[in-house]
Image (spheres, coloured by chain):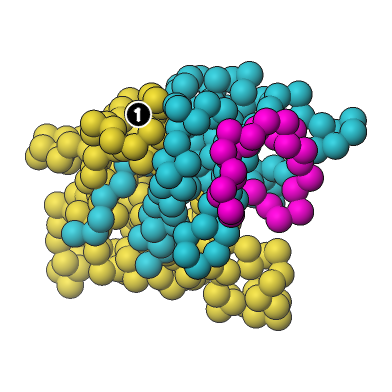
Chain colours: A yellow, B cyan
């Protein structure tokens, strides 16, 4: 029974309550959907049709449990986190703003507390994120290289650039990080290693869809 | 819209403090025989790295460090600052098993030195070595795009 003062759920609301211990099928579906969303947001994937959007929204639906329903699904959570990282995430507050102001694929913006997001991350652990990156890697490999005619180093079949860069240190806004120095390993946000095809055509954009 | 880049590989690495570039080279070995890879920095300083790339049929271009020990084995061309020669990298037991090419040229602002595993000047000229190395900064621009 719905309360009168409670607004009706929109099409974008995530009804299902998921957990990281969901079935393997649901788990792999979430990873696939998240990969699709991230690639689509980067301009590398096809645009979802309305049927696919409905599938994404229903894909995570599993029987509800006791307690307050979660407002953000795992697909939206991981997609937003990865997109935020690719856009130069400085702190959890950046992630929170991204979730709160920008729609991620078919998901409407959801305004959550910073601690709520951090709790979800801690609850899930690193395994889903690792699987997500592996899934993305597999999809990127299948896209292939769209090479242009080479005018430089014609002897080479392909030309690559290999380099790495450190991400900016994590902002020390959360309580456990406030006492640490900027150079503390706990503030190390990670680094990116890039292998770029020099001859590749322009394909991807980092702008949000 | 931002400038566009095609990212070939996106991988997760837990040991972030270790050298992750070496892992990426394994992909080159499988996907791109006779491809050329350029880097603004050395992947690892060990001279055996160039030997490995030669065995993999992957060509490599990088800048030469100032204190790199090398011994000239053959000179293709030498004129003032310009040098195109085959060298043995390292010394003693740490000497490389394969020759690499040392290219030195002046760009008007300073003398630049590059190392490459493409040992034939007719396959890759001096100017092309410099141009390839310049293209290695494409990755810097791509990273900047992501970070900004």
Give residue B119's quadrant in the image: top right
Against A46, residue A184 (above or below) is below
- Taking depth in this image into account, of A17 and A168 the one nearest to the observer is A168
Residue A154 inside the magenta-drawn segment: no
Quadrant that contains the C terminus of chain A: bottom left
Mark 1 lies on a secondary structure that is: loop
* Residue at x 17%, y 36% (from the top left corner): A46
Against A28, residue A112 (above or below) is below
Give residue B146's quadrant in the image: bottom left
Q: In this orientation, does residue B52 appear?
A: yes
Give, as a single range, the part of the protein colored magenta.
Answer: B63-89
Percent across and percent down for residue A24 are 45, 27
Quadrant that contains the N terminus of chain A: bottom left
Against A61, residue B118 (above or below) is above
* Residue at x 53%, y 45% (from the top left corner): B39
* Residue at x 62%, y 40% (from the top left corner): B102
Residue located beneath label 1 in the image: A154
Percent across and percent down for residue A128 are 50, 40
Against B84, residue A87 (above or below) is below
Left-right relation of B3 to B122: left
Q: Main secondary structure of the magenta part?
A: strand
Indicate the chain on which mark 1 is placed: A
Give residue A55's quadrant in the image: top left
Left-right relation of A142 to B91: left
Residue B83 inside the magenta-drawn segment: yes
Percent across and percent down for residue A79 are 36, 49
Q: Residue furthest right?
A: B92
* Residue at x 15%, y 61% (from the top left corner): A8
């Amino acid at each position: 029974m719905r309360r009168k003062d409670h607004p009706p759920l929109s099409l974008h609301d995530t009804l299902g309550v998921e957990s990281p211990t969901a079935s393997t099928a649901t788990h792999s579906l979430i990873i696939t959907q998240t990969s699709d969303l991230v690639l689509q947001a980067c301009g590398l994937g096809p645009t979802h049709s309305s049927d696919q959007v409905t599938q994404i929204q229903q894909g995570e639906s599993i029987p509800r449990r006791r307690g307050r329903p979660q407002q953000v699904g795992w697909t939206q959570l991981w997609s937003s986190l990865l997109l935020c990282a690719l856009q130069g995430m400085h702190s959890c507050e950046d992630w929170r703003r991204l979730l709160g102001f920008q729609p991620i694929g078919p998901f409407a913006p959801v305004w959550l507390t910073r601690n709520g997001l951090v709790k979800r991350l801690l609850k899930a652990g690193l395994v889903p994120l690792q699987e997500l990156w592996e899934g993305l890697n597999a999809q990127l490999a299948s896209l292939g290289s769209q090479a242009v005619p080479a005018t430089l180093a014609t002897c080479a079949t392909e030309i690559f650039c290999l380099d790495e860069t450190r991400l900016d240190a994590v902002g020390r806004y959360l309580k456990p990080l406030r006492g640490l120095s900027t150079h503390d390993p706990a503030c190390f946000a990670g680094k990116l290693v890039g292998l770029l095809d020099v001859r590749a055509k322009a394909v991807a954009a980092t702008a949000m869809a | 819209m931002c400038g566009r880049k095609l990212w070939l590989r996106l991988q997760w690495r837990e040991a972030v403090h270790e050298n992750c570039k070496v892992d990426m080279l394994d992909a080159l070995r499988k996907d791109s025989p006779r491809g050329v890879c350029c880097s603004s920095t050395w992947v690892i300083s060990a001279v055996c790295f160039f030997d490995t790339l030669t065995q993999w049929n992957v060509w490599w271009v990088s800048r030469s460090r100032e204190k790199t020990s090398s011994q000239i084995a053959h000179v293709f061309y030498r004129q003032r600052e310009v040098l195109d020669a085959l060298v043995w990298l390292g010394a003693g037991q740490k000497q490389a098993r394969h020759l690499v090419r040392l290219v030195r040229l002046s760009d008007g602002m300073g003398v630049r030195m590059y190392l490459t595993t493409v040992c034939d000047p007719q396959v890759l000229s001096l100017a092309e070595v410099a141009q390839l190395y310049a293209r290695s900064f494409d990755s810097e621009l791509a990273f900047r795009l992501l970070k900004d």
